[in-house]
Amino acid sequence: GINNASVASISSISQVNTAGGLNLIQVQTASGSSSIAFESKFTGYKAFLFTFTNVHFSTNTQGIRVNFSTNAGGNYNASKTTTHYRAYHQNNGGSNLLGYVTGSDLAQSTVDHQVSEDFVGDENDENISGQMYIYNPNNTTFVKHFLTETNGYHSGDYSVHSHTAGYVNTTSAVDGIKFIPSNGNFDAGTFALYGIGAV
């Protein structure tokens, strides 16, 4: 085995198994971006994780949307069925709630799915961060399940923790995933894609 005495003598390591870990595939930085798209990246792993960090919007009360492509970005209009709930708490302790968000869920719809509601402010310190998992998007037998979780700074000074989930109702391979602001642009933010569980 490898120990402190032997590592210094190793010139290379081959066949390191990273199948169970996170393997970075691509990072994109938003700067006045109307969307952030990842295309033709969804092979070689059983699942994929997106992270979005410190996403800031160009206009007030905005949120993140997502949609899926089966033709490498030719169009983003896959049918989806989704669900959405969230918790929030105002920073002065004045208001809090945990509940299902009607109107943010989809039933066999091709429109963009709301990863978060339209609440994030555009002041300098207001932003949203979160993650999305999609499972086996390259599969051609089953529908494609996805889960999202975000926390955002509401323009009314709330912390809003959103959970959404659903499935892309296609047996075609999903080979494009695009994140879109509900209005305006992504002024800033980092979007990263990782592969999990090499196949």
Image (cartoon, rainbow, N blue to C red):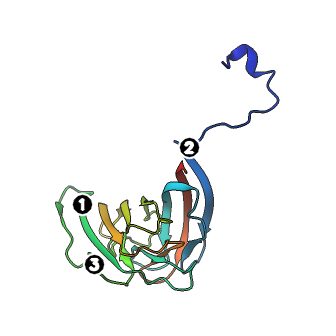
The image quarter in which residue 161 lies: bottom left
In the picture, the disc for residue 106 is 3
- Label 2 vs 1, first from the N-terminus: 2
Q: Residue at x 46, y 69 (%)?
A: 140
Q: Disc 1 marks which amino acid?
A: Tyr
Q: Disc 3 marks which amino acid?
A: Leu
Q: Nearer the viewer, mark 2 or mark 3?
A: 2
Q: Secondary structure at mark 1?
A: strand
Cα distance in 3D space between marks 1 and 3? 22 Å
Locate the N terminus and report the quarter of the image it occupies. Answer: top right
- For label 1, the crowd category at 10 Å Cα-Cα, with few meaning under 14, some 14 to 19 and many 20 or more, is some
Q: Residue at x 46, y 62 (%)?
A: 125
The image quarter in which residue 101 lies: bottom left
- The residue at which mark 2 appears reads as 19
Q: Secondary structure at mark 3?
A: loop
Q: Nearer the viewer, mark 2 or mark 1?
A: 2
- The residue at which mark 1 appears reads as 88
For residue 198, side relative to residue 155 (left or right): right
- Please name whichever residue, 124 or 56, is drawn nearer the observer in this view of the structure: 56
Q: Disc 2 marks which amino acid?
A: Ala
Cα distance in 3D space between marks 2 and 1? 37 Å
> Percent x, y for residue 105?
26, 75
- Please name whichever residue, 5 or 2, is drawn nearer the observer in this view of the structure: 2
Say if 160 sits above or below 118 in the image. above
- Label 1 vs 3, first from the N-terminus: 1
Please say whether residue 197 is visible from this viewpoint.
yes
Q: Are marks 2 and 1 in contact (CB under 8 Å)?
A: no
Q: Nearer the viewer, mark 1 or mark 3?
A: 3
